[in-house]
Image (tube, rainbow, N blue to C red):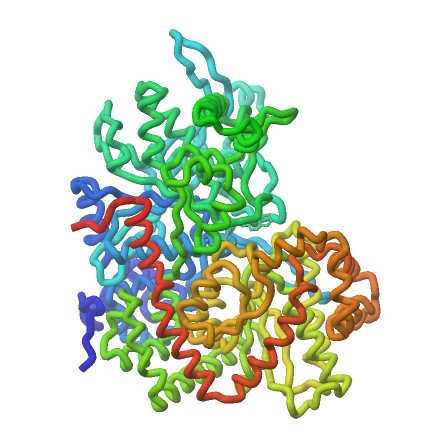
Amino acid sequence: MTEITAPKAPVTSDEFTGEIREQLKYTQGVTPEQATAADVYVAAAAAVRRHLVDAWMKTQKDMVSGDTKAVGYLSAEFLMGKQLSNALLNAGLTEQFEAAVKALGFEPQQIVDAEYEPGLGNGGLGRLAACYIDSLASIGVPAFGYGIQYRYGIFKQKFDDKGRQIETPDYWLANEEPWGHIDYNRDQRVSFGGKVVEENGRRVWKPAWSVRAVPVDYMVPGYTSQRVNTLRLWTAKSYDEFDLLTFNESEYLDAVKPQVAAENITKILYPEDSTPQGKALRLEQQYFFVAASIHDAIRVFYPGEANPDLTNFADKIVFQLNDTHPVIGIPELMRVLMDEHGYDWDTAWGITQKTFNYTCHTLLPEALEVWPADLIGELLPRHLEIIRKINDQFVAELESKNVAADQIERMRIYTDDERPSVRMAFLASYAGSYVNGVAELHSELLKDVTLKDFSDVYPQKFANVTNGVTPRRFVRLSNPRMSALITEGLGTDRWISDLSLLKGLVPLADDAEFVRKFADVKQANKDAFAVFAKSHYGIDLDSSTMFNTMVKRLHEYKRQSLKILALISTYADIKSGKVNVDDVLPRTVMFGAKSAPGYAMAKLTIRLINNVSRVVNNDPDVKGKLAVHMLPNYNIEMAENLIPATDLDEQISQAGKEASGTGNMKFALNGALTVGTLDGANVEIRQLVGAENFFLFGMTVDEVDKLYAEGYDHGGSRKYYEADPRLKQAVDMVADGTFSDGDKDVYKDLVNDWLTHDYFMTMADFGAYMDIQAEIENTYREPAKWARMAVLNVANSGYFSSDRSIEDYLERIWHTGALA
Ligand code: 26V
């Protein structure tokens, strides 16, 4: 018998219908007859929020009164995705909702579709933060997510008639947003600029201007845990003080300038760029949200105390720094402890060190934030003093440990050169208790390469926590057909909160009936995605072909260009008759990727993909065999629909460059097979699902290093082009205007890079990538074998639940647990 552990129904369908009607009437002011899908959506959201309030309040009360340490997850990005289905699932109200909206004359999907997706993140880093707060609540760990409520999220992507990416603003707050509760009574003052003066032997910061940080609270309900945590996103408001003098001189517009500037702080999410520049506004954003959050934590954990004893602060809350973006919180906590609460340096340092930990999400040294010291000095003069003092203490500590002078020089937090700067990753590595990477390989490389100097001196600080994804959103909700089959196979739905139970599916991989059902589910998901693609993008997909997907941010290191070159090669071979068209495995290749607006090479790659798509899809010679689509505006909703419909997933980054990847986990958990390199979490996925169930190709980290040592990126790639006729033909077709109406100039920067530089070694891995395709196609031609491999991928991927990641953080880094 199937054991059901989902939350018990708190109300009947009729009662819930009544609650929605009430919201429609008293909050929206519309009759059920007048109500549109958007009205019902807002009413349903308000109704489900009411069901969460008691658990939310109890969680907060238990958190403050109990002795379980809370987690403060500081992140500049939370890529939440739509909220309604998730909130309904966790509140145990899904069925009541469906019945209620039908009673009101709507289809549930219409109501879900009325929600506008909040895109408050760039990619994996922001989505990871969202998965982690889901898991914290589901495990019952008291936690705050602290971040920024940007008025404009990640841009919306369109393509122009030449296939180029066009960015349009994402004004996600244009319509009513029923989830966030703005709490004007829990605001914080955040100050900037000015100078530091000496007063009675103390350094006193006299800021020049202040901004009002107002929290917008989002409930984060746990699945079956009866716990509801808080995501507190700060929005900037101006204080009502304006320059009367200027005003009296009747220059009204000048007088309101500071107000406008204040509110600009949270106006826009910065797109992750090809190079992180020292943009003043970005530093303002970072300081704004961490300063507000630190003060908020003190207010929450020492309620009403004028002179709280903050020596136990680190027993109340531990802050996780999600990449370097919140690292300015370190000197801020030092300043708060010393300047606002009177602690001496050493006491403040002891508290600060215990409070912070740092997660690094990259390996590329150029992606680690470095701020010009003069910019910090202008915006946060007191913090710069503190940073310099931390640096002095650090250098003295290294000297006392007899660290060599050149190593000390490399490790400096504050670089004392012509243009001094502050290295945020180094500040975090020194000041925090732990530094962790996000997959085993990544953590090893952090220790051996990126932060080697630090791991030499402080080996005990380094830890690994392999990323994970929430099984609620990315399996249960996004793949209901497969979820039902899993529950049937396991005889329980407890896997939703204990994903390791998927292991129980392993024996079913040899049960022909189960494997057939599994294949049927995949086919149904593909059919459903074809309908989705038609309605959302106006394209026709042939769901009888293999669905081959590559979705992720566009970066050279991820190597979308490897995939596109391989496609061009296949296309050319069919056209030239080199391969018999009847031998070609019919495939639909789908890309989804946004490029940073200022990243020229990435944008050119998007243009190329669009034009390969145009040429291939309009060529009758390959019809029914090959179709290529660049789906616009890749976001969470697209991922939720496309991942369950995918047969083959591409994780083809250059080894040693993708810190972890989380898309790779979502695909494996949804029964897609992976073609991938030994990079990031691919390594662990392959270990767990079995090498025989993973299509591995390409160079290893060591092989990559060896090629660099031989000078590959200074002309070495040309050799591969000359040696492999398939590669030569593909590159030549890009160069000769086949995909640009004969214009040879359009892609010349791309071609030139491939042949002279090719830092990420697309040319060198091309042959291996083409070779593995034959194996993939042969396997796919045996549907039962493919489906069996897919079942084994699902069965062995339970490890990639973000619940497991959070358990690892609790044990290795936070040293705390769930509320009683
Ligand atoms: C920034 C930059 C800017 C300079 C050029 C190259 C580059 C590459 C990456 C980044 C973003 C770094 C932060 C980030 O988003 N990391 C992602 O974090 C995910 C969650 O841990 C992880 O799965 C991805 O592998 C990692 O790229």
Q: Whole-percent x and y of residue 497? A: 27, 65
Compared across the picture, whether 622 is left or right of 729 comes to left
Q: Residue furthest bottom?
A: 582
Which quadrant would the N terminus be assigned to in this image?
Answer: bottom left
> 323 or 532: which is nearer to us?
323
Number of numbered discs visible in the structure rendering: 0
> 574 or 407: which is nearer to us?
407
Residue 243 showing in the rendered view: no
Quarter where residue 662 is shown = bottom left
Q: Whole-percent x and y of residue 586? A: 60, 85
> 7 or 455: which is nearer to us?
455
Residue 322 showing in the rendered view: yes
Q: Is residue 463 above or below residue 348?
A: below
Q: Whole-percent x and y of residue 54? A: 19, 53
Compared across the picture, whether 796 is left or right of 691 comes to left
* Residue beneath the point at 41% across and 34% down: 329
* Residue beneath the point at 67% across and 56% down: 707
Q: Is residue 230 above or below residue 36?
A: above
* Residue beneath the point at 24% across and 70% down: 494
Quarter where residue 736 is shown = bottom right
Compared across the picture, whether 390 is left or right of 740 comes to left
